[in-house]
Amino acid sequence: MKKLVLRILGIVIAIILLLQIPVTMAASTKELENQQEENERKIEENQQKKNEVTAEKNKTVEEVENITSQITDYENQISELNTKIEELNTKIEESQNKINEAQAEYDKQEELLEARLVVSYEEGETSYLDVLLASESITDFISNYYLVTELATSDAELLDSIQKQKEEIEQAKTDLENSKKELDTSKAEKQSITTQLEQTKSEKNQKVTELTQDEQEIQAQIDELAEANKSLDAEILRKQKEIQAQLDANKNKGNSSNSGGGTSTGGGAVSNSGFIYPVPSGYTRITTDLYYSSGQYHGAVDFGCAGINGQPVYAVQEGVVVTAKSQTTSYGVHVMIAHPNGVYTLYAHGQMGSLRVSEGQYVSRGQQIMNVGSTGNSTGPHLHFEVRQSPGTYNNRVNPIPYLP
């Protein structure tokens, strides 16, 4: 009997345990589902925060770029005002010289007229008619008539000359005063813009501090390149006529293969723009395009795949070498070429000592101009390649990709 009771009790306990297993499993499953939902909610929240941070970061980057563009505008306005002020100073100096010369001539003519009047007074009230009537013969009459006519004409011309010089002096004085007023206005405008420029630079510095460390480093590179390009822009603009004359000369010769003494070693496909790749096939992968990963404007493309260090850099199209320099900052070892189709290309960060062309040289498409390196503001071996529209200045950079094969 006792054994039977124990057996029944064991069966009951077993049944109870079996009944609890689904409940426990259900509870466990529900707990897991709740945990999963919680995890998904957290993931969504984190993703939302990430998107907000990214949006804010991109907004700050965009603000920095807009402020930089505004700074460039202010600097351009100041440059134009400096030119205008210089022209006005020259104009004022010319007007003052003109006044001095006209006054001297006026004084001279006035002295001549006074002398003429004194002689006339000292000779009495003799009129031109008295001179004619005193003629003793027809020949004498004709001679006196000619003399009287010349004197009358001379007197009239002298009076007209004096009056004209007087008017010129008055006009020159008016121009001088207007130029001085315009000069004062230009100086005041320059001072106002200079103040705005300094305020904008301060605002930019504040915004830059909000960027991440990587973004700040990129911004520093951008600023350094922009500063270096100011002198390069001036050099390009100064050489415009010379460059165009050389391009026209080679076009007229019909010698588009002129390599300026070098050898054409590049090759590969040619794009609709007439460009080849600036690096050998096998190294044409673009590692950075028109924008950095942060969203900041790069204004170029970088060829930086493994093994590219030391590879040759080719002129993508024939043209005139605008500049070929070896520097340790900004672009480092770099070359700029002006092409017949009105665009410019720039190749930067080449190896020190690898330049194979010189300024003013005419190069052919595919001619080697230097070797890939990591000079200047560079974090590793790569070719920084820019395409610029005429007149080839820093603000005329465009996307190079459509020009490439």
Image (spheres, helix red, strand yellow):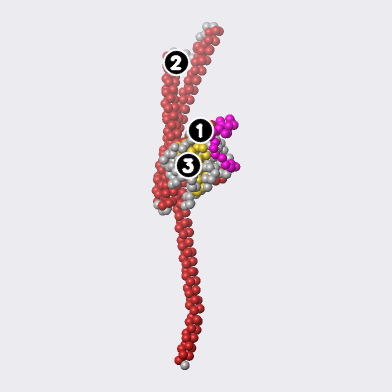
Residue 319 visible in image: no
The local secondary structure at tag 3 comes to: loop
Residue pictured at 54% horizontal, 10% vertical: 142
Q: Which amino acid does label 1 sit on?
A: Gln
> Any mark on residue 147, and which?
none
Residue 40 visible in image: yes
The x and y percentages for residue 341 are 57, 38
Q: Which of marks 2 and 3 is in front?
A: 3
Task: Say if the magenta span includes residue 320.
Answer: no
Q: Give the residue at mark 3.
A: 310
Q: What residue type is labelled 3?
A: Gly
Q: Vertical placement of 368 versus 36: above or below?
A: above
Q: How many labels does the image show?
A: 3
Residue pictured at 49% horizontal, 15% vertical: 151
Mark 2 surroundings: few (<14), some (14-19) or many (≥20) residues within 10 A: few
Q: Tag 1 or tag 2, which sits nearer the N-term? A: 2
Q: Tag 3 or tag 2, which sits nearer the N-term? A: 2
Dominant SS type (magenta):
loop
Mark 1 surroundings: few (<14), some (14-19) or many (≥20) residues within 10 A: many
> Any mark on residue 120, and which?
2
Q: Vertical placement of 161 versus 187: above or below?
A: above
Task: Say if the magenta span includes residue 259.
Answer: yes
Q: Real-space Cα distance between discs 2 and 1?
A: 75 Å
Residue pictured at 45% horizontal, 40% vertical: 351
Q: Real-space Cα distance between discs 2 and 3?
A: 95 Å
Q: Tag 3 or tag 1, which sits nearer the N-term? A: 3
The x and y percentages for residue 3 are 46, 90
- Quadrant in which residue 229 is drawn: top left
Q: Vertical placement of 259 versus 194: above or below?
A: above
Q: Give the residue at mark 1.
A: 361
